[in-house]
Amino acid sequence: MTKFIDQISAELKKAFQSLNYNPDLGRATISNRPDLCEFQCNGAMAGAKEYRKAPLVIANEVAEKLENNKVFAKVEVAPPGFLNLKVSPAFVRDYLIAMAKEAKFGLELPQNPLKYVVDYGGPNVAKPLHIGHLRSAIIGESIKRIIRFAGHTAIGDIHLGDWGLQMGLIIVELNERKPGLPYFDHEYHGAYPQEAPFTIAELEEIYPEASAKSKTDALYREKALKATYDLQKGLLGYRAIWQHIMRLSKDDLRKNYDDLNVEFDLWKGESDVQDLIPGMIAEFKEGGFTRLSEGALVIDVKEETDKKEMPPCLILKSDGASLYITTDLATILERVNEIAPDAMIYMTDKRQSMHFEQLFRSARKTGLVSSEMDLRFLGFGTMNGSDGKPFKTRDGGVMRLEQLVADINDEMYRKIAANRTVSEEEARETARIVGLAALKYGDLSNQAAKDYIFDIDRFTSFEGDTGPYILYTIVRIKSILKKYTDGGGIIKKDALHEADSDEEKALMLVVSGFNSMIEEAYQEIAPHRIAAYIYDLANALNTFYHHTKILTESVNEKQEAYIALLNLTKEILETLIDLLGFSAPERM
């Protein structure tokens, strides 16, 4: 289904072409002066120089051609040559009826869908999720959903940090605490216990203590490095401990991500590609892509066009140890071989931009990916406290993610419970649903690359540009529709009529922009575009609601039309909040 604004542009193009002007001049844009018109076209001014005519002359010629055109209710010319356009209410009605009947509201789907890998999450195992993991999870999940809705394949990969020094630290600390465990007896040849020698709570306490020791005790750190080496070389006892760590950590991570309504298709980690690294490095060397620098192996990625320093990419340290970027290159190799994606999108803190620039250049230079492969780094800004600095707990520590979610839920429950007429259980569940909306919308309504202030009072408010306000709008529509159907009414999707008020037409015009917005959100990989549209749609709906008698309307055809418009608006809003990763309760 052709986008609404493209249908308007098509009529303008015909008019320009019929006058022997370049049809490309007939491009409509949404008016930035809604008090004057709904759409505008500046083509007459763009064509004035080419055709050596005053823009007013060209604009008047086009306006005359558009007289009696069924798409337009009014076409006016304004100096120095603007075409101010108002569309026909019948044209808007017909377009919305078609939207209501079509899958995905008539969104044009690609003829050649692409396959994306979306790399987001990125937690280290054996460590609890903290608020630094929030934005990657929320933004990455939304991006994955947007890509899928746009008609493409998106595979979400958590990309675990599961093979580094933290494993050696845990092994050494566990050995000091429980030296009698069979994992540390190199003469032991039996089966290792199936039950882990620690709980997830103990594991999360072991790592920070071990990490702290390694920073002040050189011998302790050497032991941890040796344990990491032995683990990676396949020492059976250490591999058994690692498997316990992985199982407990994954179970805990799944629970936390479930609370955020975040789902990964792949639970791959650094460990999955370790066997690929030796062969990959050998091919890099044979291809002449590497050189030695003070004993370390590097790939030169500097280009002549660089205007700032671009250091070589270090892929093996002088002792032969690999690095994060080595693992990332091997992960690209694995994805190309097993998934064959058209694009890979990486979602991490924007301060890692140099790492990904080196990674992408290395992947292209060495031939891991073709020149057509779309490798994209989407760096996000930090979530800050009211002081403008990265958000901390009251005692200055890094807040655990589950604590942040609990705080939001508690605040929402406090507001809901203040005047609740539902059971305690329902109030808690509603608070959880609305709390997640508050958290996610509060984040996603900001451009990903920008820092933002986390303000729990503002995020949980039922007024303004917030998740609770959006959900309250959806619940309001649900309530009206329920009363209508409970009274015997039947929702007819094609019952829409020509708008009989400015407020109704304004709502219908916002609805008509759905497909254009989705296309922009996909092209730009920008969830904040969806959030902005949701807010505009909610505002237009509420303005219409406050100016229109719906359930008390005595003319049956009018009421059916109002109900059809409300239903279409609700379906679009529910679709869009799902793309942002949250849902609406039945009542609030």
Image (cartoon, grey):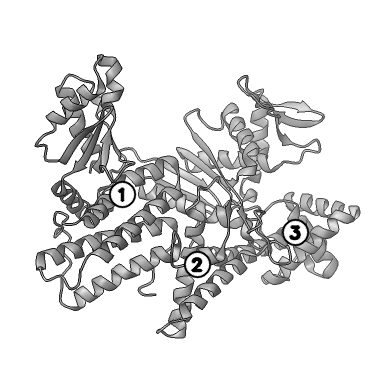
Q: Earlier in the sequence, mark 2 or mark 3?
A: 3
Residue underneath mark 2: 460
Location of residue 501 by image quarter: bottom left
The residue at the point 34 percent across, 61 percent down is 574
Location of residue 132 with respect to 277 vertically, above or below: below
- Image-based side of 317 in relation to 581, left or right: right
Location of residue 25 by image quarter: top left
Q: CA distance from mark 3 to mark 1?
A: 54 Å
Crowding at mark 1 (Cα within 10 Å: few <14, some 14-19, many 20+):
many
The residue at the point 45 percent across, 37 percent down is 342
Circle nearer the viewer, 2 or 1? 2
Of residue 47 and residue 547, the one placed in the foreground of this image is 547
Q: Amino acid at mark 3?
A: Tyr
The residue at the point 60 percent across, 21 percent down is 305
| Contact check, label 3 and label 1, Cβ < 8 Å | no
Q: Position of residue 46 (x, y in %)?
A: 30, 23
Q: Position of residue 68 (x, y in %)?
A: 9, 37
Q: Earlier in the sequence, mark 2 or mark 1?
A: 2
Q: CA distance from mark 2 to mark 3?
A: 46 Å
Residue underneath mark 1: 514
The quarter of the rendered structure image containing the C terminus is bottom left
